[in-house]
Structures are given as structure tokens and as C-alpha cells.
Image (cartoon, helix red, strand yellow):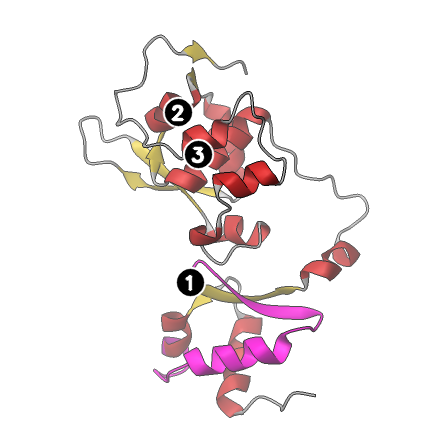
Amino acid sequence: MSEPPDDLARAVEAALFAAVEPMSVEALSTHLGGVAVRGALHELRDHYAGRGINLVERGGKWHFQTAPDLAHILRRATEAPRSLSRAATECLAIIAYHEPVSRADIESIRGVQTAKGTLDVLMEAGWVRVAGRREVPGRPVIYATTTAFLAHFGLSSRRDLPGIEDLRAAGLLDPEEDLVERAAQPAAQDGASDPSAAQEMP
């Protein structure tokens, strides 16, 4: 059985349990008076490994989460699974592999105009956020993924996204229409999308 955490690790543990959202190393350090907390975080991560809850880092921020193999126990039977339309799935893949991207970038890769509701669905799910505006004429809004996206898919960072060959080997790509492979190609700049692109159906 692992040794109990020391006083600093216990303080970090308490701060994370009380936090309403994941915390960065810098935020934790500031909260605890400027002490170095990275070692304590690693100590706690090892302490909780194999338990019912784990300490994980997602996008540079730390939080406790239910162990992946036990998540189904806490999921209510009446909870409807979150299901995305094909259009939303394609948009999410493009944003994840190419962020930050504008609507014009997304449309250039997909070859169709993107309905406003498609991006709204991804933002309501908490997986996509507005990341600012691109400094070009018109200053279009650009989008990026969130820490919640990383947590939902079990990723520590975007570097952990599977490669094209990994997806194809897992049978997750349609060999006839490989959208994610197109998403890995450089996106067009705003205003460069094909004006003849088809309109996406609602």
C-alpha cells in the first residue's frame, strides 16, 4: 500500500477537491501561497493510480475524475448518450486537428457550408470554444477545443490525438470518404473557400 501523502500533497489534494474546475500548476501554486506544487501533483497522481478516482492532467490543468473502467457505474440509466450528427462530428474533427480554425477553414475542408447550429451544438456540449478573432480583413471568429473535450476523450493534450493510420487501422475511417485525412491537410485561409461549395442541409 502506498505511503500517505505529505502535508503539501494533502493541501494540493484538498484544493483540487474543492475547486469547481480543473486547476493549472500556476493557479494551485498561487492558491497555496506560491509553493512549488508539481512534485506534490505527481505524488498524488501515483497515490491515486488504480483507485476509484484518478488524478489526471488535461490540457495543462489537473483534476480528479472517476477511473475510466468505473465510469459506467455512475452514469444514470436514464441518461441519453450524447450523439453528434455527421456534420458536427466532421467539424469537431477538423477543429481538433487544425485549431484554431474559422468557419471558412472548416467549410474549405468539408466542401460544404456549415450551418450555424452545427458549431452551436459543439459549444453547448462544452467541447468547442471561441478562441478569438483572426487578424485578417473581416476579423472572423476562430474556434478551438476545450479542456472538457480532452477529458471526455481521455487525452492529456492534442498531441495525444490518434494519427490517420491509427484511425484507419482501428476501422474508424471510411476508405471512400476520409474526412479526417482531409482535415490533416493545411486549411485554406478565410475567404479562400470554394464559392461553389454546396449548402449543408439543416
Query: What residue is rendered at 76% in x and 57% in y?
Result: 74
The circle on residue 139 is none
The residue indicated by pointer 1 is 60
The residue that disc 3 covers is 94
Q: How far separated are the C-alphas under marks 3 and 2?
A: 8 Å
**Residue 125 is at least partly visible in this image:** no
Q: Secondary structure at mark 3?
A: helix
Mark 2 highlights which residue?
A: 109
* Residue 46, x across and y down, in percent: 58, 78
Q: Is residue 161 magenta?
A: no
Instruction: Give me the residue at 38% from left, 78% from top.
Output: 29
The boundaries of the magenta stretch are 30-59
* Residue 147 image offset from top left, x and y in percent: 48, 53
Amino acid type shown at disc 2: Ile
The mark closer to the camera, 1 or 2, is 2
Q: Position of residue 7 (x, y in %)?
A: 52, 91
N-terminal of the two: label 3 or label 1? 1
Q: Is residue 168 visible?
A: yes
Q: Is residue 136 above or below residue 75?
A: above
Residue at point 45% right, 55% down? 157
Residue type at tag 1: Gly
Query: In this rendering, would 34 be left or right of 177?
Result: left
Q: Looking at this view, is 115 or 88 the one in front? A: 88
